[in-house]
Image (cartoon, rainbow, N blue to C red):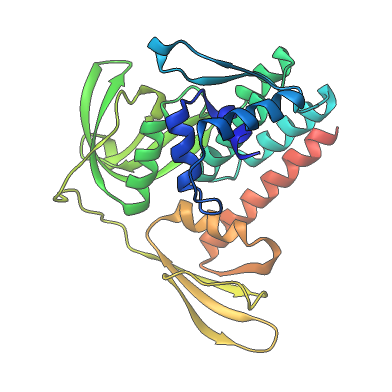
Amino acid sequence: MLLLSYLLEAPHSYEEIKKYFMENEFIHESISIDTLRVYINSLERLGCEIVRGKKAEGSKYKLVKHPFELRITDEQVKSLIKVFKSLTKSIEVEDLLAMTKFFEKISSGIANTDLKLTLENISPLKKLNQEIIEALINACRRNDEITVLYNSPSSGAKEIDLLAEKLVISNNKVYLKGISPQYKDSTASLLVSRILEPPVIKLTKTIQKDIEPLVIGCEIYDKNLPLKDNEKIISEDEEKRLIEITSDNKFLTSQRILSMGSSCKVLYPESFKDEIYSTLKKMKEEYIAEKV
């Protein structure tokens, strides 16, 4: 099973396979070339076809086909896509990247070409450079000041200095939001598909935030829910906790509150409470519209 899993990823040489077995935390032992042949014969009896490549190409063992194809019907694919599209309306880009990789794994086990292409292309991240996406996720998480090479539709490729805040999905496109003195009102919204290479992180920050931290009061009804560093308990009783969240990133705070579902109720400030209510109302309307 371990050999099958490894060959499903890519063709590998005997030396690579031997190292893979040695470094496995459960097996942690080398295998001889004779043992490898026994394993390959066993897989072939199960219906696998494994060939060994040319010596000039590294003599790598390649899994040509196997009998463990996923059987997913057209209706099941439609359901998967419907759930995926619903999630993209509220999911964080970091989680979406993990889901995209998951769907890539699913599609690799499907023989039906049409279903494979459908699953491979439903994520708004699919056509983006994953190295750039992962670098931007890390920059937003740390609130780094970065320089990006951006292909502007009006002025072509140019460098933009930005205090990275968040990645958001809108109309099935991914945008980088942040503070930049090169933009009106210092607010930048860059289409990630136009960022040409991974960002360069500045060692010294020069862009300052002029935004006062937002303090949000909430009732939490699940007392087992772990709190984050910027969340503190104001009071509690047997049924609930009153907490305050202090944040300068309204988007991430909204995502945090929405992720708690019915276990959280916003008490103040009224303006933020109204925004959460509007978001929930919009989500409900979209679900109702899908049923019509």
Q: Can you say which quadrant of the picture contains the C terminus? A: top right
- Asked which quadrant contains residue 75, the reply is top right
- Check the image and report above or below for 158 versus 229: above
> Image check: 59 left or right of 110?
left
- Check the image and report above or below for 245 versus 159: below
Q: Nearer the viewer, residue 243 or 75?
A: 75
- Check the image and report above or below for 149 versus 156: below
Q: Nearer the viewer, residue 211 or 258?
A: 258
Residue 67 makes an appearance in the image = no
> Image check: 138 left or right of 289?
left
- Check the image and report above or below for 31 versus 212: above
- Asked which quadrant contains residue 81, the reply is top right
Question: Residue at left 51%, top 22%?
Answer: 11
Question: Residue at left 36%, top 22%?
Answer: 194
Residue 86 makes an appearance in the image = yes
Q: Nearer the viewer, residue 42 or 6?
A: 42
Question: Residue at left 66%, top 74%?
Answer: 222
- Asked which quadrant contains residue 3, the reply is top right
Query: Which x, y percent locates residue 16?
Result: 44, 32
Question: Residue at left 52%, top 25%?
Answer: 10
Q: Nearer the viewer, residue 204 or 152?
A: 204
Query: Which x, y percent locates residue 72?
Result: 80, 27
Query: Which x, y percent locates residue 246?
Result: 41, 68
> Image check: 253 left or right of 110?
left
Query: Which x, y percent locates residue 164?
Result: 31, 45
Q: Can you say which quadrant of the picture contains the N terminus? A: top right
Single out the residue that lies furthest toward the front. Answer: 34
Q: Total label count?
A: 0
